[in-house]
Image (cartoon, rainbow, N blue to C red):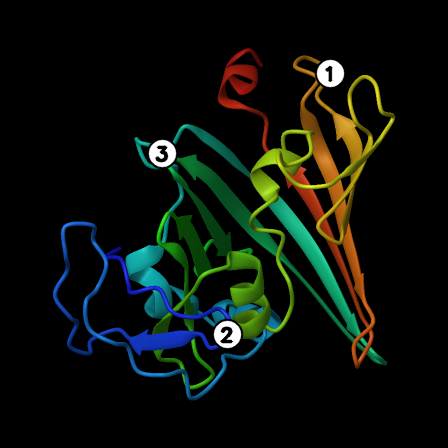
Amino acid sequence: MPAARVGSCAEPRAERRGEPRAGLGSAGVGRGALPRLTAVPQPLAALLRRACLGLGALLLAACASVAPPPDAQRSYGGRFAASVQRGAERESFSGRFLLMVLDGGIRLDLASPLGNTLARIEVGSHGARLTAPQADGALAVFTGSDADALAQTVLGFALPVSGLPDWIAGRAAPDRPARLEPEDGPAQRIAQDGWTIVIDERSADLGTPSRLTLSRDEAGPPPTALRLRLLLDPPLEEAAQR
């Protein structure tokens, strides 16, 4: 997908697919200003419900991806199950994810259980970009300087985008404070960036995490508790041996 101009994370900007685009410079960043965000999409649970009705493929057919691109340095795929508790309200949903560590960036695709891509988050040297349908069904691209805050603004809850490539590999993200348990040997519990990551299970063959639980509690208002469980597909080299 073409790159979009990076805007302020506190004031994300959006553009709709099909609208005229500004020209691209040599770095692939739009020179013209994008229209300001006027409507925030529904939370991802609502997008999942629409995808189950068969609309997800129409909304994000251009972004659908079932395999990592050739330039992916590392990739992790599998299933996710999430629950968001906001005060007395609780939402639960599940689907599939594909996380790719690219040359100088990250890409995270979230899909419905049917395989329809619901959101794509891309992080690079020029900031973060999130592609998702709005509440009225129009496909929009939101940009900001920080992927985690951008997900909070657009989807309605935080996603551990910046730390996920390291946490999913069983280690803390570098250059940021973290607490590991145990301090020596493979970590079973990581506390970093307001998230608690518990490695519930590791691969018997490779010793890499195969099942993780990520949790985050925010004071609010309203108080919000997010629980995210990840079940990773076996790595290609491990699956080939089976």
Amino acid type for the residue under numbered disc 1: Ala
Q: Against 25, is 100 above or below?
A: above
Horizontal and vertical percent for residue 110?
51, 55
Q: Nearer the viewer, residue 8 or 154?
A: 8
Disc number lying in front (3 or 1): 3
Residue at image mark 2: 50
Q: Nearer the viewer, residue 213 or 50?
A: 213
C-beta proximity under 8 Å, tags 3 and 1: no
Horizontal and vertical percent for residue 67?
39, 38
Residue at image mark 3: 103
Q: Against 80, is 224 above or below?
A: below
Residue at image mark 1: 204
Amino acid type for the residue under numbered disc 3: Asp
Horizontal and vertical percent for residue 59?
36, 70
User: Split into 4 quadrants, where in the image is the C terminus?
Assistant: top right
Q: Residue at x 56, y 71 (%)?
A: 155
Could you tell which of marks 2 and 3 lies nearer the N-terminus?
2
